[in-house]
Each structure stands twice: as structure tokens, then as C-alpha cells.
Image (cartoon, rainbow, N blue to C red):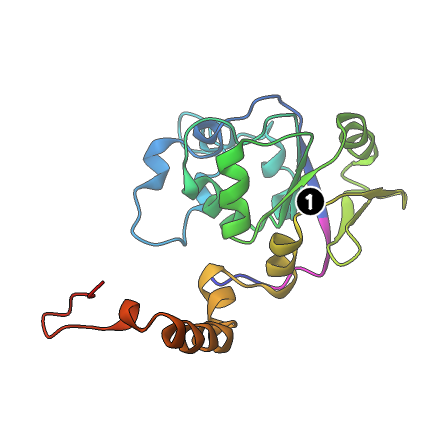
Amino acid sequence: MRMEPFVSVAGPAAAIMRNNIDTDQITPGHTGMKVQKSGFGDGLFFNWRYLEDGSNNPDFILNQPPFTEAKFLLAGPNFGCGSSREFAVWALRDFGVRAVIAASFGAIFTSNCFMNGVAPIILDETEVNAITAEISPASPEITVDMAAQNVISPSGRIFPFQLPALQRERLLEGLDAIDFTLRREPDIKSFQVADGARRPWVYKITSSREIVA
């Protein structure tokens, strides 16, 4: 799954206003038995989205148009707590979610979001609730303006947010960690040349390919 630039995105926002939604609820363990990052969307909120016979649960919001095409989630505090389960974020991305908006997130989940192009946006809980109150099937759309760092509600209310500068830059440009590093390859090579002149012993390789101190 390639990361996409996130400059300004508009789309339906689904509200799942439960506190402490953990990674096992986002993606139960059995949904992660894959060998690549794609195909996880069907397992997102598996135990809530599907009935025992495997059919869609009509009472769950992601099965209700227009939220079947949700680009954003609004959630209760401490979203993504629990175990380190990167495929929870892969499932969000595969479903089409570009950002989760909540009052707080699990720390490891936050890191996994940034690594995989999903924006974990923190707003005050009252602000999350205010946006949620405006969402309806007839008026489901919000805008997340990453360039301006604003969430815009259906009525046009603006809610500013802040992300770490480096992570925001990667989201804006759609760069994963490898792409971000490769873009700085000239700087890395320049450093290696300069550092090699200062500390040549660090770069001296023996015939056995061991670095000689």
C-alpha cells in the first residue's frame, strides 16, 4: 500500500464514540493472518461489523450508507490502546480511512498511524463531541486540511489541531520512512564523505568485511 499525499481531504466521517477502543477491537487477531499489507479492510471492527452468520450487522455505522465510504473516524478517548498491532492501522487504511479524530490515542498506535499514512488527530473531547453532533446521513462530510491543520465540520466550524512537524511533512507529501530517507540520500552521502575524512578508521573494511576500529 503506497502512501498518498494528504493535503486537504473531504469525505464522510463515521462516529464510533466508545472510549478505550483497543487494537483487538479494531482488528481481532484472526484477521491479521496475511503476508502483505493489503486486504485488511474486511477485518476492520470485525466483531462489530458482522453477525455470527457472517452477514453485515445493519446496526453498525460502517455498514450504513454513506458511512460505508467513511474517510474519517470520530472516536472516544484512548483510541488504539492495547497491544502493538500494526495491521490495525493497515485495516483502517485499506478501508479508506485517512484520519482518526479523538481526544487521545494509544502511544504505539499513534506511531503506527504516522508510519502508514493515517493521521491521528487530537482535539479536545468537547470538540470531538461537537463535530459528532453535526454528523448525520444527510450531512456526513467533514474536511481535514492538513496544510492549514484544521478540521472543518459540516456546518463550516473550524477546529485547529497540531501534529509534529516531521510527521505532518511526511503526511503532506505521502512519504513512508524509506521514501523520506531516500529523499535525503544526497545529504546522507555528503555526511558520509565528510565523516570519512574526519574518522577514516570507521569506514576501513578488512578482507573479511569486518570494520576495523
Secondary structure, mark 1, is: loop
Q: Is residue 67 left or right of residue 47?
A: right
Please say if 87 is above or below 1: above
Q: Which residue is mark 1?
A: 66
Question: Residue placed at 41% from the left, 34% from the top?
Answer: 84
Q: Nearer the viewer, residue 110 or 181?
A: 181
Q: Is residue 202 left or right of residue 146?
A: left
Type of the residue with mark 1: Pro
Residues in magenta? 5-11
Q: In this rendering, does residue 120 appear at all?
A: yes
Q: Is residue 9 magenta?
A: yes
Q: In this rendering, does residue 65 appear at all?
A: no
Q: Is residue 42 magenta?
A: no
Q: Residues within 10 Å of mark 1 (few under 14, many from 20)?
A: some
Q: Quadrant of residue 178?
A: bottom left
Q: Position of residue 106 (x, y in %)?
A: 54, 31
Question: Residue placed at 66% from the left, 44% from the top?
Answer: 72
